[in-house]
Amino acid sequence: MFFKHNDKIQKKNVNIACWCTFTVWAVLLLINSFYEFFMDREFIESSFTILVIGLVVFFVVEAFLNIYKRKSEKSRNI
């Protein structure tokens, strides 16, 4: 069930969403390390919060790209 083939998945959009997620995680971890090194406290204390932020970014970017693609296809067909 989890590995069922789905033709509706846009692999290009998923790849863009993955890159955006990893970029957000990298920036957050870099900011966190600078805060911890220079100010002796963390910017975001919970690793779970960083994980959830990345997952939210992934799903929001993917949904936005899918909506954008559908709207651009509709405008081409008109």
Image (spheres, rainbow, N blue to C red):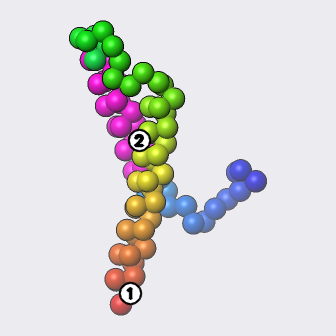
- Residue in the picture at 46% in, 60% down: 63
| Residue located beneath label 2 in the image | 21
- The picture places residue 31, in percent across and down from the top left corner, at 29, 24
Location of the C terminus (image quadrant):
bottom left
- The picture places residue 40, in percent across and down from the top left corner, at 30, 9
Q: Along the horizontal axis of the image, is 73 left or right of 55?
A: left
- Residue in the picture at 50% in, 61% down: 10
Q: Along the horizontal axis of the image, is 36 left or right of 21?
A: left
Give the total of numbered labels.
2
Which portion, as a residue range, is magenta? 15-34
> In the current view of this chain or complex, which residue is farthest to the bottom?
78
- The picture places residue 24, in percent across and down from the top left corner, at 35, 37
- Residue in the picture at 33% in, 13% down: 41
- The picture places residue 8, in percent across and down from the top left corner, at 57, 66
Q: Which quadrant of the figure has residue 13?
A: bottom left
Q: Is residue 37 above or below residue 65?
A: above
- Under mark 1, the amino acid is Asn
Q: Nearer the viewer, mark 2 or mark 1?
A: 2
- Under mark 2, the amino acid is Thr
Q: Is residue 12 visible?
A: no
User: 25 or 76: nearer the eye?
Assistant: 25
| Residue located beneath label 1 in the image | 77
Q: Along the horizontal axis of the image, is 76 left or right of 47?
A: left
